Image: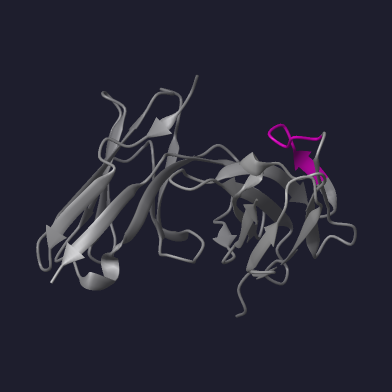
Amino acid sequence: GESVGLHLPTLSVQEGDNSIINCAYSNSASDYFIWYKQESGKGPQFIIDIRSNMDKRQGQRVTVLLNKTVKHLSLQIAATQPGDSAVYFCAENRGKLVFGAGTILRVKS
Amino acid sequence: EAGVAQSPRYKIIEKRQSVAFWCNPISGHATLYWYQQILGQGPKLLIQFQNNGVVDDSQLPKDRFSAERLKGVDSTLKIQPAKLEDSAVYLCASSLRRGDEQFFGPGTRLTVL
């Protein structure tokens, strides 16, 4: 079936380093992806999105890369901070959101 | 601007009991969503409303789950009777229009014993 999933369940990085979180999708017709951050006890929070007519999109300290050839996208966080510790989800927006399983990001001080 | 409000934040019940969750979306948001998030998984859409009409309830276990949004604003999600596998966080989200950015509430954590 169609799915959106993640490669790494847990990522530990040193404060100040860059983080890369990966996501694979299976539906080649997918055209709109969103990254969410979910902190403990809170709902998911929008970080950045990208449409299939783009390969890269940058925000504040975050960059999303989309490789349609291999159906893969990644979220890069520059200069990772303790406040970035959370679970990160990629999701496909088909009018409704289809979420992957999530990656736990732990930032070591 | 106030965010999406949900209550209660936590609920513990025994199996076969009933439970209801309440959601107040962001003012003016026409689209409201209920998600189920089982521990260690991403949220899964249960039902989507456009104003007071159901757009998508294909993933809602209709034998035990029901939801309504009678006046197109607040919404309630009910489980009757609850099963152990219903233990999860129930998230409500809203968006201005269908397909727009969704804003999530803090969720209700349900534990079924």
Judging depth in this view, the residue of B95 and A105 nearest the camera is: A105
Q: Is residue B11 magenta?
A: no
Write down the region rendered in magenta.
B54-62
Residue at (80, 35) in percent of width and height: B62
- Classify residue A88 as left or right of residue B78: left
- Classify residue B38 as left or right of residue B56: left
Write down the quadrant of residue B105 in the picture. bottom right
- Classify residue A70 as left or right of residue B10: left
Judging depth in this view, the residue of B88 and B92 nearest the camera is: B88
- Residue A65 visible in this rendered orientation of the protein: no
Give how far across and how far down residue A19 sits, in percent. 17, 54
Residue at (41, 40) in percent of width and height: A101
- Residue B15 visible in this rendered orientation of the protein: yes
Give how far across and how far down residue A49 sits, in percent. 40, 50
**In the figure, A53 relative to A42: above or below?**
above
Which residue is outermost to the right?
B70
Write down the quadrant of residue A86 in the picture. bottom left
How is the rendered protein coloured?
A: one colour
Give how far across and how far down residue B53 sits, in percent. 84, 47
**In the figure, B8 relative to B2: above or below?**
above
